[in-house]
Image (cartoon, rainbow, N blue to C red):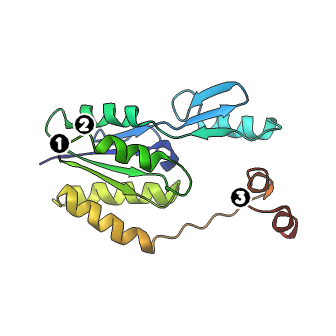
Amino acid sequence: MSIKFITDSGSDILAPHDSRLNVLPLTIRFDEDEYKDGATITHHEFYEKLIESDTLPKTSQVTPYIFEEAISEARSDGSDVLIITISSRLSGTYQSACIAAAEFDEGVYVVDSENVSVGEKALVTYAMQLADSGMQCADIADELNSRKQSLHTLALLDTLEYLKKGGRISKTVALAG
């Protein structure tokens, strides 16, 4: 049985990409302006706005309805579906995917990447490689849930300002650098 993949734009997977993959955009708000990540705003435009803005952007998860639509489309040819989401500690996207997946009797599997960006992308890429080798969807989901525990992402930041503004670190930690 063939496998289709769904992830969110937190994976930073840019178009064009494998036709088996559907990347659903997170919503980004700068003040009153709303954008769909990767669809109505590019990464370059996002970072320009981030530098120019006095306030941090707000993000919104992919809704259960959007996931349900994507799953229906992917399942239309009988394919199994593997959804890999941004970390549930950073977004409600995983929960939205689980709500949508519960509407289907079988063939839909959801994995919380417990990562973002390159870490999430690495799991998506690995899942597609496993599918190419003939592994079944349920087994791929199990493998990802096992393998993600050994995946570590290191980020080097020019500034801690945005982490401080977003409440991810204290002012003291930001000052200490």
57 left or right, relative to 94: right
* Mark number displayed over residue 79: 1
From the image, which quarter does the C terminus lie in?
A: bottom right
Q: In terms of image quadrants, where is residue 126?
A: bottom left
Residue at 81% of width from left, 54% of height from top? 161
Amino acid marked by disc 3? Arg
162 left or right, relative to 83: right
* Mark number displayed over residue 74: 2
Q: Position of residue 47 (x, y in %)?
A: 69, 40
Q: Nearer the viewer, mark 3 or mark 2?
A: 3
Q: Is residue 157 above or below residue 10?
A: below
Disc 3 crowd rating (10 Å Cα; few below 14, some 14-19, many 20+) is few
Q: Is residue 78 above or below residue 89?
A: above
Q: Which residue is mark 3?
A: 168
Disc 1 crowd rating (10 Å Cα; few below 14, some 14-19, many 20+) is some
Q: Nearer the viewer, mark 3 or mark 1?
A: 3
Dot 3 or dot 2: first in sequence order is 2
